[in-house]
Amino acid sequence: SFVLPVYGWRGRVWDKWFYRAGLGAYSFLAGRDSLGPTRLMGPKELLASAQGLEPSGLAGGVCYVDGQFDDARLAVALARTAVYAGAIVLNGCRVVGMLDSADRVAGVAIHDRETGRQHEVLARCVVNATGVWVDAIRHMDDARASRLVAPSRGTHVVVDHDFYSSDAALIIPKTSDGRVLFAVPWMGRVILGTTDTLEDDLPLEPRPTRQDVDFILSTAANYLAKPPGHNDVRSAWAGLRPLVKHAEHRGADTKRLSREHTILVSPRGLVTVTGGKWTTYRQMAEDVLDACFRGDLLPFRPGGVTRHLRLAGAPPPGTFNPPLSSPPGLHLYGADAPTVEALPGGDREILPGLTEAMIRFAARHEMARSVEDVLARRSRWLFLDAKAAAGAAQAVAAILQDELGESFAAAESANAFIHLAEDYLPP
């Protein structure tokens, strides 16, 4: 559940009905796929639902229902599912050049960061699905290609559940600069966000600025009865959105750029897809394949083969999983939970909700090759509590060395993660 509070006389006579109408239309358009009804709430009901909300001047609000997921774990599930279907997945390899044949893209040259070796991979069709970095790959194909993406930096701040002790997420539809603020219960913590700032640089590890963090905390203070300060931030992090920059939008701010996906096929046959969002990832994939078929880059196959494909670890239909507002635990593994439990160390916690057995599962079944892989993306501890995650780095490295062998540089991997975690503390 998401609750949208409204304050003051305007909220009482106009705002909540306005938001009710808009969100009600959203529910209506979803039809049978709607997750729940949209409804009005009075001040008392709203405060009971959103514990920690500032009560002064509250006129009521609107409640609607949306979905929640763990983006990194879904990415891993997709990669595992692809492997089961026959794909080869290379973790930690960087594209350094295009291979040519008769003035067509015929594959890529890749650099394996783990071994330092370079390889050439031949392919009938190359798809460039590298997010905000698609233009760098496009320029390997055509140095004159115009810039397609205008990256936007979104910053998030994580605080303890005490500051907003509710299972319902909070959304403020219009902040002082016209954007949206949310407070979402997530894995035993609360995520506050977000910002939307044009980003010219494209770092592999984008960093939140002090200005971004100050804005989130000061805006949250207007709506939370117990406002968090800098010392209360467990982790602060930023991500880059690949917003599509069409010619008519050059110079536009990020609020006006397209959130939809775009697919381009270059004269030499490089297929690029960018923009879009997680909720439409499967449709994006189908559209990419359609473009490959139309360009005669791949032999035609009928579409929709993944429409009912269950991903690796998907529990049986109808099985209930606790929401992601719950602290981390075995429920994150779905049907793989018994496999995790059977591994050594199931009763030894490295961090709350993260056991030795889970780290072994990450190495054996989820392609984890570093401490960062485990603590940032197979579990989310870097994003939940950067200091606690850094404190567990040595223990995680020791388990990975047991799994990956003596060739695994345990001390180097742990130290690299500890250095990374310092950048997730508030600036």
Image (spheres, rainbow, N blue to C red):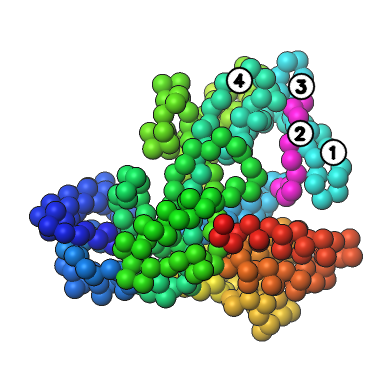
Q: Which residue position is annotated with label 4? A: 145
Give the vertical position of 111 relative to 84 (above or below).
above
Crowd class of label 4 (few under 14; some 14 to 19; many from 20; radius 10 Å): few
Q: Which residue position is annotated with label 1? A: 118
Q: Which secondary structure, mark 4?
A: loop
Residue 336 falls in which quadrant of the image?
bottom right
Q: Quadrant of the C terminus?
A: bottom right
Q: Which residue position is annotated with label 3? A: 100
Q: Which residue position is annotated with label 2? A: 96
Instruction: Please state which amino acid type lies under the numbered disc 2.
Output: Val
Q: Is residue 389 magenta?
A: no
Determine the CA span between mark 2 and mark 1: 9 Å
Determine the CA span between mark 1 and mark 4: 26 Å
Q: Which secondary structure, mark 1?
A: strand
- Of residue 74 and residue 372, the one placed in the foreground of this image is 372
The residue at 83%/71% (across/down) is 402
Crowd class of label 1 (few under 14; some 14 to 19; many from 20; radius 10 Å): some
Q: Earlier in the sequence, mark 4 or mark 2?
A: 2
Determine the CA span between mark 3 and mark 1: 17 Å
Residue 409 falls in which quadrant of the image?
bottom right
Task: Tell me whether the residue at label 2 lies in contact with that at label 1, contact meaning CB atoms closer than 8 angstroms.
Answer: yes
Q: Earlier in the sequence, mark 1 or mark 4?
A: 1
Residue segment shown in magenta: 89-100
Q: Earlier in the sequence, mark 2 or mark 1?
A: 2
Task: Tell me whether the residue at label 3 lies in contact with that at label 1, contact meaning CB atoms closer than 8 angstroms.
Answer: no
Residue sticking out furthest to the left: 13
The residue at 58%/68% (across/down) is 385
